[in-house]
Image (spheres, coloured by chain):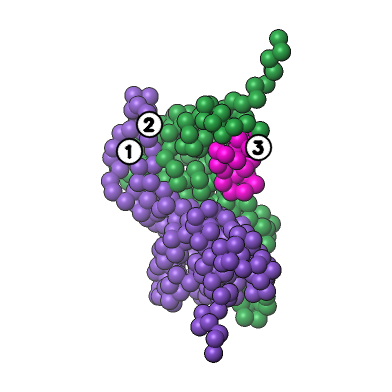
Chain colours: A purple, B green
Amino acid sequence: MGRPRTPLLDRERITTTALQLIDETGDFSVPRIARRLGVQTGSVYHHVDGRDGIVELLRERVASAIETATLDLAPWDAAVEAWARSYRAAFAAHPRAIPLLMTSPVRAPRVLDQYERAVTRLLEAGFELAGIMALITALENLVLGSALDLAAPETMWEPADSASTPHLAAALAAVGDHRADRAFEVGLAAFMDHARALCESGRS
Amino acid sequence: MGRPRTPLLDRERITTTALQLIDETGDFSVPRIARRLGVQTGSVYHHVDGRDGIVELLRERVASAIETATLDLAPWDAAVEAWARSYRAAFAAHPRAIPLLMTSPVRAPRVLDQYERAVTRLLEAGFELAGIMALITALENLVLGSALDLAAPETMWEPADSASTPHLAAALAAVGDHRADRAFEVGLAAFMDHARALCESGRS
């Protein structure tokens, strides 16, 4: 009785507020979260494990949009390719969170579980243990670079006059719709071909 | 006489200050540049073409570290590969500028000249006009994703206990030094193989 149905402060609301701040300004801070929620800074620290703890809550929130069932598809390359597409879509929804999440160590259990599943699939497919993290990271670099590009304008190059850059102007005039999607497809096709070739050579 | 050798305010100093703010906080604003330089906000606007103008000055500054002579190497694939390595190094020095520069249209003349050179080399190599911007963008997504990864910690995954993620733990234990460089090499090799195959098929 008299207790609010939605608590003023909980980890969900702190995460939502941190993500709003990042989407709007590119970063967050605990005092700014507190100000926006109308509470004392110390109250926020009661609920989370400091700034690093909020980063992991953010990671779980953004990564929760990745369809993890993709990693169960067969064969392994269909799984990796579908995971990459879903991963890109999840992070493209919050492009300004990408630099923060890419440059802090992954500790969120649910996200680590997703890496465990990816590593397991690649091991089962016959990849050598020593190269698996480099392979996954190469894919992530492509996925997250492409997610940032998806947040870029459709017209990304604006030469003042095409006379000084005639070949660029011609190449730009030849680009159709969905330029970011098409670039991602080129990068993903390159990665998948390379991964399949690596897998074949490892097996033989 | 009496005139300071270094003017209090010029485009170089505005650019340097904007880049410092981005390196430190992830973003810049004209009022914050003015505060740091000890001048009125309006004075900054006298020297630059608004916020967008500063973004292009930042783009020229960061891109000036790319060795453009790489684009003159022969054959074309040596040029593209060396350009990609130099491009990654230039942007890895300012990882927090990457999202800003990736999501605003390219208008800086010197940077457009670099794209002109890249497009020209690919056309000369026999690539089809319609696919060239997608190819360049795919490479940039990889390069800039990898530049962000280079700013990440050497230990990027920290499972609380390896019992729940045994395969991930094993894959991490098998990773040697320079994990980010090795992942970039995997991605770059995949891209170059794909580009060479595209080039061959386009010629035949």
The three-letter code of the residue at mark 3 reads Arg
* Residue drawn where x is 32% and y is 51% of the image: A178
Residue denoted by label 1: A172
Quarter location, residue A163: top left
Q: Secondary structure at mark 1?
A: helix
**Magenta stretch: residue A203 in it?**
no
Q: Position of residue A105 (x, y in %)?
A: 64, 63
Same subunit, labels 1 and 3: the answer reads no
Query: Which residues make up the magenta segment?
Result: B15-37
Which of the pair A119/B147 is nearer the observer? B147
The three-letter code of the residue at mark 1 reads Leu
Q: Secondary structure at mark 3?
A: helix
Q: Are marks 1 and 2 in contact (CB under 8 Å)?
A: yes
Which of the pair B65/B177 is nearer the observer? B65
Q: Secondary structure at mark 2?
A: loop
Same subunit, labels 1 and 2: the answer reads yes
Residue denoted by label 2: A159
Which chain contains the residue that carries disc 3?
B
* Residue drawn where x is 62% and y is 68% of the image: A39
Which mark is drawn over residue B201? none
Residue denoted by label 3: B36
Distance from disc 2 to disc 3, alpha carbons, whole Å, reads: 32 Å
* Residue drawn where x is 50% and y is 45% of the image: B100
